[in-house]
Image (spheres, grey):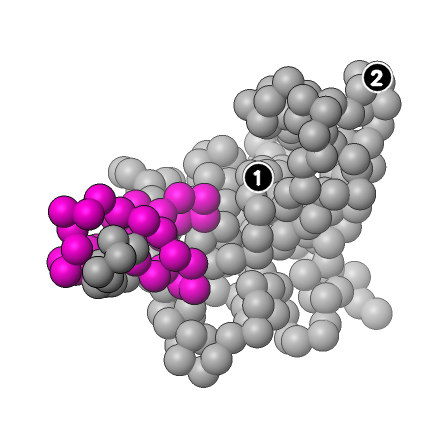
Amino acid sequence: MFAQEHTPGEMAQSDFTHMSDLGITLGGVPFPHVLFHLVLTYSNVEAVSLCFAESFEALAEGLERGLWQIGGVPRRHRTDHLGAAVRPLEALERQEFRARYLALLDHYGMEPSTNNAGEAHENGDVEQAHYRFKVAVDQALRVRGSRDFADRAAYERFLHDLVQQRNHTRQPRFAVEHPLLRPLPTAPLAPCRELRVGVSRFSTIQVLGNTYSVPSRLIGTTLTVRVRAETVEA
């Protein structure tokens, strides 16, 4: 084993982590969810965003939100082995995924980096950050005295405040790293997956294996559908 030496402004690592074992509820109802977690490997400044699946859309939206929360862009981004991080992909899907992922990184001027399949330690900074962040969430929930939140917005504010507290302790190293991060582009990319789908005689459309109803006046037409992590826009 060799100690890793991190260079300021060089790399961010990201991955998904499941939060169900923490027992979060919204209005008394269990709230199973996933967090996308982004960490700068030099300063350990982090950002999280809530999602519900390890999809490309969740990765793209989480990465973009993370960079804007941090306020700069490192030279490289490393994520888990891309095919495994999302789900097993067919050859054509892998090609499409890679093209979309590279387009996203190109928008931010970052170079892609991925660990080898089965070698999770190569993404070790974010893996360790998962563990420490979930311990911090658990401790904060114990201090709070309840794992129940009124709604999703209240829970996301709780997470945001916790991330800010943790990042505050990393300011000395971030002060070194921040000037070496590249500036953000003028606007977010707001990535999404675009599909062209026909409206059936039953006034429905098929989008990635799911059926949705649309107004009957659209029967026989073709729609452009934009798929994001949580929304489908036709």
Residue 51 lies in the magenta stretch: no
**Residue at left 43%, top 64%?**
209
Q: Position of residue 174 (x, y in %)?
A: 60, 35
Q: Is residue 184 left or right of residue 5?
A: left
Q: Position of residue 56 (x, y in %)?
A: 47, 58
**Residue at left 14%, top 60%?**
220
Around disc 2, counting alpha carbons within 10 Å, would you say few (fewer than 14), some (14 to 19), or many (20 or more)? Answer: few
Q: Which residue is mark 1?
A: 50
Nearer-the-camera pick, 165 or 7: 165
Element type at mark 1: strand
Q: Which residue is mark 2?
A: 145
The correct choice, above or below, for 148 with respect to 128 in the image is: above
**Residue at left 30%, top 45%?**
233
Element type at mark 2: loop
Whether residue 56 is visible to the viewer of this picture, yes or no, is yes
**Residue at left 64%, top 75%?**
116
Q: Is residue 177 left or right of residue 105?
A: right
First in sequence: mark 1 vs mark 2: 1
Whether residue 10 is visible to the viewer of this picture, yes or no, is no
Q: Position of residue 28 (x, y in %)?
A: 72, 24
Q: Position of residue 177 (x, y in %)?
A: 56, 40
Around disc 1, counting alpha carbons within 10 Å, would you say few (fewer than 14), some (14 to 19), or many (20 or more)? Answer: some
Q: Is residue 190 left or right of residue 62?
A: left
Q: Amino acid at mark 2?
A: Gly
Q: Amino acid at mark 1?
A: Leu
Residue 160, quarter of picture: top right
Quadrant in the picture for the N terminus: bottom right
Mark 1 to mark 2: distance in Å? 22 Å
Q: Which residues are magenta?
A: 205-234
- Asked if the residue under mark 2 is in contact with the one under mark 1, i.e. CB atoms within 8 Å, the reply is no
Looking at the rendered structure, which numbered label has been put on residue 184?
none
Nearer-the-camera pick, 152 or 105: 152
